[in-house]
Each structure stands twice: as C-alpha cells, then as structure tokens.
Amino acid sequence: MECRAQCGACCTAPSISSPIPGMPGGKPAGVPCVQLLADMRCAIFGSPERPAVCAGFLPEESVCGQSRTDAYASSAGWSPKPALARPADGGAAARRIR
C-alpha cells in the first residue's frame, strides 16, 4: 500500500514516546507532530533525526483504511512498539510518499 497524500494521520493520532526534534518528550495522541508540514508531509523525512518508530512505520490497510477518516479512526488507539525495526528495504517504500 502506498501512503495517502494529504493524510498525516500517523503523525497526529498516535502517541510517540521517542524524542522528536522540537518535541523532546515525544507527543501525546491526537496532537500533530511539530514536524508535520502544512501539506501533511514530514519535514524530517529521511533525516537521521527522525525517530525510528516513524521511519519504521509503513502504511497498511489495517491501519490506514480507505480514507483519511478511516486512518484517524483506526490509529486513534495505536501506540508504536518501541522495538519496531527498520524495514528490510531501509525505508525505500516509505520514501515513495514524499
């Protein structure tokens, strides 16, 4: 599945406990990440400053659904797993969303 343009649900809905540039304590659920740009892209995408949990997340039907509304609804209770590994492709699939 490709990431949906103009969505940003995965950068808003879940809580993230890892430090994020500009949010050293992470972010609570429902709060947009400070790195989320107006066009719903990540300002630090591909940067080593991007938290591993963000770099390791790949869009999937069970989380993203068919629309931005679906993605917010299904990810509202989502909490990233701290041991989430970087994808085998090094994040190449996720980079196609930029």
Image: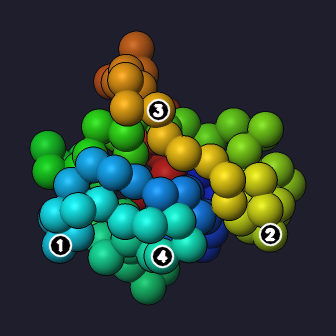
Q: Residue at x 54, y 45 (%)?
A: 79
Q: Residue at x 27, y 49 (%)?
A: 18
Numbered-mark total: 4
Which label belongs to residue 67? none
Residue identifier under label 1: 22
Q: Which amino acid does label 4 sit on?
A: Val
Q: Which amino acid does label 1 sit on?
A: Gly
Q: Distance between the residues labelled 4 and 3?
A: 18 Å
**Mark 3 or mark 2, which has the lower sequence index?**
2
From the viewer's perspective, tell me whether residue 44 is left or right of residue 42: left
Which-is-in-front pick, marks 2 and 1?
Answer: 1
Q: Distance between the residues labelled 1 and 3?
A: 21 Å
Question: Which picture quadrant has residue 45?
Answer: bottom left
Residue identifier under label 4: 31
Where 29 falls versus 57 (above or below)? below
Residue identifier under label 3: 81
